[in-house]
Image (spheres, grey):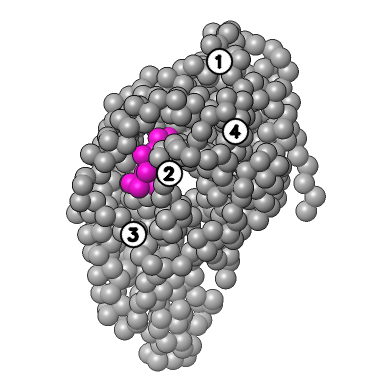
Amino acid sequence: MKRIIIVFFSVAVIFPTAYGQKKRKSDVSDNAAIAYLDRSFGVYDKLQKQIWSHPELGFLETQSSGAHQYHLRENGFAVEAGVAGMPTAYVATYGSGSPVIGILAEFDALPGLSQDTVPYRKALVEGGNGHACGHNVFGVGSIAGAVAIRQWLEANRQTGTIKVFGTPAEEGGGGKVYMVREGLFKGVDVVLDWHPSTGNGVSVGTGTAIMMIDYVFRGVAAHAAGSPDRGRSALDGVEAFNCMANLLREHVPVSSRIHYVIVNGGEAPNVVPDYAKVSYYIRSPKRDVLKNLVEWIGQAAEGAALGTQTTVETETVAGFYELLNNRTLSELVQSKLEQVGGITYDARELAFARAIVRGLHEHDSILAQAATVRPLAEERPSTGGGSTDVGDVSWNVPTVSFGTAAFIPGSAGHSWQNAASGGTTIGTKSLINAAKVFSLTAITLYTSPQLLAKAKAEFENRRGKDFKYEPLLGNRAPALDYRVKK
């Protein structure tokens, strides 16, 4: 199907107060990293839109990962591709010696969320993929930051190493877990992470640990009308299992989450299904609680199989740890975010943003969130919510995460509104700001060994001296076909 792509280009119009903040002189105006980013908007606008225009699902991001790698090689990075058994994973390195700073880069899209860059629902490809989580912006912001840091290292003849970890399949495949398991983060002193957001701020939540498990029931096929007594329905097994899982919701911690989808329930009503498959996401803020919950749900599956005279097999598709925060790094990144500031919309972007907000039945005043930086909040225990494979990284290397306003305030996660916004210059402004935060943070870490030592000491104290990393997904190989329809 022919694609019609409408993009928005930036013009130098600055709106005060409610929708933006005036640019100000910075004490880093002569910084080589910041200067590089200020003159490279067009480069990264083109690159993020290239990836946005060809959204690829987890472990299938050949063109997206390739575009990352090409740009990094062009800018002096040594790139090792296909690491940890994943063809689209890579590690790019520049510099030498300590400290070693890592930056995470993602690039996978979501299924079924194709969207044009317009403020109303309009799929480019019906049922097609879309960057509704902004990973087109995410990855490009990360490599822009890394290249900018390289500019600073070179200009200042500074010892230090910058690494970009190209991590596939964050949306369910858990590429980072395999990279951690293979030891690719060993020797890294700090990992910097970000994510496109509806505002600007440092992430202080711990999220949830997650197990993604497929349950496959097998029975005996038969004519559903002529000889039903000869059959044993695999779908009955799935439905009995789901019923029991729903009943146990009353008895699990309120912060836990259980959700599922029947992937295959049979082919025709007049054939007793001999095969059925249901995929579960099971979450809890603490992985110890999660392990007990997974065991209980597994017992329900076995009981359902016994009750329907079918059999059940389980496959762990992926599993992530909860996040381990680092207050020292959070305070550092907060100061850099405040230095960089928020997103200033030009006239065209403002019209687009207003249209999105009105479609969400919000007031225009909510747009001020894009221009401001949230104060650093206290870390809070998770009461549920999403999961990320950054969690496994954070238990192995001191890690900090933040967000910048690539999406229109008021938009929901994984929405067409996010796909629309991220593919415009709003998304590009967000990634440039993220790259500046990466640069300023890295510069401080390269030049402040005492601060780096403090962050590492906090990390060791928080995870405990007896901590031993054991991936929740065990020793399974990457599920490279988990997004392939079968």
Could you tell me if the residues under marks 4 and 2 are in contact, i.e. CB atoms within 8 Å? no
For residue 235, which quarter of the picture? bottom left
Residue 394 in the magenta stretch? The answer is yes
Q: Residue at x 62, y 19 (%)?
A: 345
Closer to the chain start, of discs 3 and 2, is 2
- Provide the residue designation for mark 1: 28
Residue 3 x/y as whole percent: 77, 46
- Provide the residue designation for mark 3: 472
Marks 3 and 2: which is nearer the front? 2
User: What kind of residue is marked 2?
Assistant: Val
Residue 319 in the magenta stretch? The answer is no
Q: CA distance from mark 3 to mark 1?
A: 43 Å
* Number of other residues with Cα within 10 Å of mark 1, as a class: few under 14, some 14 to 19, many 20 or more: few
Residue 143 x/y as whole percent: 60, 38
Where 225 sits versus 18, above or below? below
User: What kind of residue is marked 4?
Assistant: Arg
- Provide the residue designation for mark 2: 188
User: What kind of residue is marked 3?
Assistant: Leu
Q: Is residue 58 visible?
A: no
Which secondary structure lies at badge 1? loop
Q: Residue at x 25, y 65 (%)?
A: 295
Residue 428 located left or right of residue 11? left
Could you tell me if the residues under marks 4 and 3 are in contact, i.e. CB atoms within 8 Å? no
Marks 4 and 1: which is nearer the front? 4
Which secondary structure lies at badge 3? loop
Closer to the chain start, of discs 3 and 1, is 1
User: What kind of residue is marked 1?
Assistant: Val
Mark seen at residue 150 = 4
Residue 477 x/y as whole percent: 46, 67
Region rendered in magenta: 393-401
